[in-house]
Image: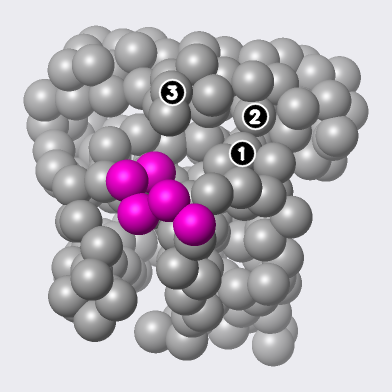
Amino acid sequence: MKHLFQPGTDTNAPVLLLLHGTGGTEHDLLPLAQLLSPSSPVLSVRGNVLEKRMPRFFRRLAEGIFDEEDLKFRTKELYDFIAEASETYGFSRDNVVAAGYSNGANIAGSLLFHYADALRGAVLHHPMVPLRGLALPDLTNVPIFIGAGTNDPICSAIESEELTYLLQGAGASVTVHWEGNGHRLSSSEVQRAAEWFKAAFPS
């Protein structure tokens, strides 16, 4: 998968797996990584799927309707890639925290829904429920931040609450931060995520 890796200054800090939104690239969320954990190694990945020339992490059938088979396939593809990258770059596979926005948050959520050992934690900005009717793995004590919008036209407040319920039901420790800025990733939301990150993963 097309990606970039930055070693970071603290090899013990969580490795940030950056996952962009629709139409983004592996460079989009680098400023977010600096705010969340400036000393962390960074693995930033570009989605393998193109929708009208816009990179995404999996196909969709329409706005808000996922191609579930492709989502499952791409989730495993990303899961395997993280393992390969850990060997290539010499970081601990057990120390990866995802930070994703929109489509990137959805593929991060799918990793959590499918694999107990995929992520040490996650920062999910405006995620949707990736799949329904799935028995989630044990996510006991996995810290998760969800940035949600009270007026998000793509991801409704009800969707955010359902995702929170499902993750908590699997044992995850979920913090939800609400904004009124639609689907936009605002500076105040990012600041709250950074504060949460420092508390969840103290150096």
Does the magenta run of residues contain 10?
Answer: yes
Please tell me which of labels 1 and 3 falls first in the chain: 1
- The answer for how far apart the CA atoms under marks 1 and 3 are is 11 Å
Asked if disc 2 and disc 1 are in contact, CB closer than 8 Å, the reply is yes
> Marks 2 and 1, Cα distance to the nearest angstrom?
4 Å
Residue holding disc 2 = 194
Q: Mark 2 or mark 3: which is in front?
A: 3
Work out whether 84 lies above or below 197: below
Report the side of 24 relative to 108 (left or right): right
Q: Secondary structure at mark 1?
A: helix
Q: Which quadrant would the C terminus be assigned to in this image?
A: top left
- Give the x, y percent position of residue 6: 51, 71
What number is the disc on residue 36?
1
Amino acid type at mark 1: Leu
- Residue 120: quadrant of the picture: top left
Q: Give the extent of the magenta segment.
A: 9-13
Q: Secondary structure at mark 3?
A: loop
Residue, far front: 9
**Which residue carries the number 3 mark?**
202
